[in-house]
Amino acid sequence: MKIRIGYAPGAREPERDDFTGLCRSLEELGFDSLWVTERATGPGGDPVALLAHAGAVTERIKLGTAVMTLPGRQPALLAQQLATLDHLSGGRLLPAFGLGQRLDAEHQAFGVARGERVALFEELLPLLRRFWSGERVTHDGPRFSFDGVAVRPTPVRGAFDVWMGGTADAELRRAGRLADGWLAAFVTPAEAERGRLLIERTAAEHGRSIDPEHFGVTVAYRHGDAPAALRVPRPGLSDADLAALVPSLDALDGTLTRYIEAGFSKFVLAPLHSPADWRTELTALRDVLALQT
């Protein structure tokens, strides 16, 4: 089991001392990695800039995007940007991509209509892999055209294991066809297991396989009662379902055990609140989960 920490500052803009303290505390307390969310029209900041700073103030923790919007980006420039970050951090980048949030403002920010996102994603991800391989890319597609274009640098390890987000059946099947791993979010253990099985079946149908260790889930946890507003993304959510989806800190260990039984081994844990002091928060989390440093 690897414990990763998700950074989503909510309504606050990222603050240098707060974010630096989080990064250094993760490293000193033995956590595996830092994962940042993306919302272009929110206050949380750019994921690549955040991870670049995290890489500069740490030496060991891995750096992940949970998840980065792909439609709306230029593949050659994004390939170079992420590979550069990987080089400067010593090969620690873990990219995970998605279609982006289902908000009109986000679609406008990326210059992509909602109905265009899937076709763009399907064209973009294979192009990124080709650029990261170091080949000179020739491609004439519906949105992008390249004639012998290569970008440098390439990833430190020669390629990235690319994870994908999403929970709809179409997104799960896409992950089975294109991804190296799946990062689920806001799903029950039973839903997570169903998603994993669908991804594995789809991968097998396309002559692929996904490493059993490449299934993870983002789990929000809370101190005290869960806000009623959390029911909005999941209409009809019962108190019991809400408690399972967003466990209290004390119940977190039991919740993770249920995900492990469903075939998951990587966990991005994200507190619902904004901790006043990250070191205190992470120490409490480590103690509850009996993590070894």
Image (cartoon, rainbow, N blue to C red):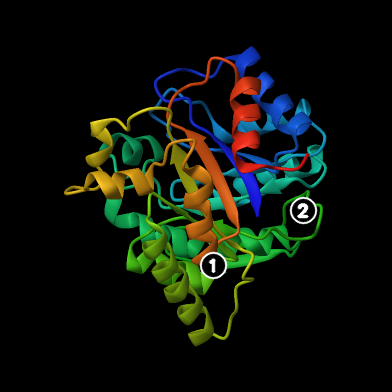
Question: Is disc 2 placed on a helix, strand or loop?
Answer: loop
Task: Mark 1: give few (<14), some (14-19) or many (20+) Cα within 10 Å.
Answer: some
Task: Mark 2: give few (<14), some (14-19) or many (20+) Cα within 10 Å.
Answer: many
Residue 11, placed above or below residue 8: above
Q: Where's the N terminus, which quadrant?
A: bottom right
Cα distance between the residues tagged 2 and 1: 32 Å
Q: Amino acid at mark 1?
A: Gly
Q: Which mark is residue 174?
A: none
* Residue located at (45% from left, 37% from top): 221
Question: Is disc 1 placed on a helix, strand or loop?
Answer: loop
Residue 249, placed above or below residue 21: below
Q: Circle 2 is placed at which residue position? A: 154
* Residue located at (33% from left, 62% from top): 168
Residue 53 visible in the shown view: no
Pinpoint residue 276: horizontal percent, then vertical percent. Answer: 54, 14
Q: Which residue of the protein is positioned furthest toward the left in this rendering?
A: 236
Pinpoint residue 11: horizontal percent, then vertical percent. Answer: 39, 20
The one nearer the camera, 19 or 226, is 226
The one nearer the camera, 10 or 212, is 212
Pinpoint residue 33: horizontal percent, then vertical percent. Answer: 67, 41
Q: Circle 1 is placed at which residue position? A: 263
Which callout, 2 or 1, points at the residue further toward the start of the chain? 2
Q: Left of 236 or right of it: where is 7?
A: right
Q: Where's the C terminus, which quadrant?
A: top right
The one nearer the camera, 185 or 138, is 185
Residue 88 location, quadrant: top right
Residue 178, placed above or below residue 226: below
Residue 98, placed above or below residue 123: above
